[in-house]
Image (tube, rainbow, N blue to C red):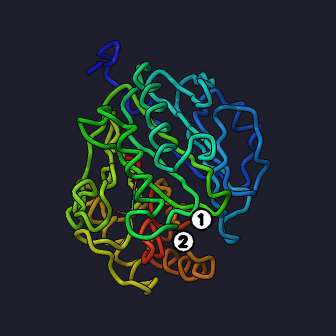
Amino acid sequence: MNQPRSDHRMPASSRPVVRYRPGGDLDEILADPGTLAVMTFGDALPLRVDDPRVLNVPLQPAASSQSSCLEHWHVDDHVESGRDAGLAWASSNHWLFAALDLDEADHGSIEDSAELAYAQLCGFLDRRPQRHVQRLWNYLGSINQGHGDDERYRQFCAGRQRGMGHFFDNGYPAATAIGHHQATTRMQVYCLASTLPGTRVENPRQLSAWRYPRQYGPTPPSFARAMRLPGDASMAISGTASITGHDSRHEGDLEAQLGETLANLKALLKSNHQPEHFGPGDPLKIYVRHPEHVARAEAFFDEHTPVSPRIILNGDICRSELLVEIDGWRFA
Ligand code: 3EB
């Protein structure tokens, strides 16, 4: 396995900070030499900006989330950026953002597209000093379309696994996979990687996803529940839903699913020896399947995580009985 080119220890100050910037000015953020990435959501902002650091996530923010909210990844370092055969990237000395936004129609099936996306991403990372993936996001169209093993999410899992090849033989990174409502064939995959490996964290309340039994599909999902970043105790938290063991819980009950999900998140923090609450520096992203559930989700978070910044996005969870999923960050 490749090692970082020098054995410099990573100063904690070099790790990215992720912040939501309600009403943030995109030009101003891009002029900052430490900007590693900026996400816009849905059609809230102009979609086409010719800068590899800008990614338009195809999920519509809830009307209550500030419509012009940006997500800003910032490092205390100088960032360079470019494109490599359709892959957009930006990197500092220690950190790398890379993103693919592809059309399945160009590659055949969703399975073939996922394989190609992951093969391209892993091939690119393999040539970079920042080759250690900490965190991955996957946004697919019509994620629950198709029955049984023909469901698009399950086919995505198979293609992703094939495309990963042996790249993650030492363990999967943290991840999210959510369905969007734009063109079904739009597939977006992006990641945060580093020169040093992170530490994978599993959830004591949940079976590791890669060990899910056959009933959830022929290829179990390839992700860790969380990743502790190199440099300090900060943690990137995977998409977390109302699942204990491997069972979906509280079908049809939004508040109960939210409660179970928060219990899962707290268990993850506890197993990482951290206080079991989210603070003002810990941004959360809440994916809500039905737009009409947004107000109730807001009320839940006002009560249970009042100080942590949040963005609520309309998106589908990869099991059709699940109504909500949460991912986010715990920064040291
Ligand atoms: C779960 O716990 C919910 O396929 O990358 C969460 C996070 C989920 C990541 C993925 C799937 C993924 O199984 C689903």
Q: In the picture shown, does residue 38 fall above or below 219?
A: above
Give the alpha-carbon distance from disc 1 to disc 2, as whole Å: 6 Å
Per the rendering, the mark at residue 288 is 2
Instruction: Give the numbered dot on residue 313.
Output: 1
Which residue is painted at 56% across and 66% down in the image? 315
Nearest the viewer among 11 and 197 is 197
Disc 2 element: strand
Q: Residue at x 63, y 23 (%)?
A: 82
Q: Position of residue 48 (x, y in %)?
A: 77, 42
Q: Is 238 above or below relative to 130?
A: below
Q: Are marks 1 and 2 in contact (CB under 8 Å)?
A: yes
Element class at badge 1: strand
- Horizontal relation, residue 317 to residue 181: left or right: left
Q: Quadrant of residue 257?
A: bottom left
Residue 331 placement (x, y as % from top left)? 41, 48
Residue at image position (73%, 62%) is: 67
* Residue at screen point 51% across, 66% down: 286
Q: Of callouts 1 and 2, which one flags the residue occurring earlier in the amino acid sequence?
A: 2
Look at the image and tell me in which quarter the N terminus lies: top left
Reply above or below: 190 against 299. above
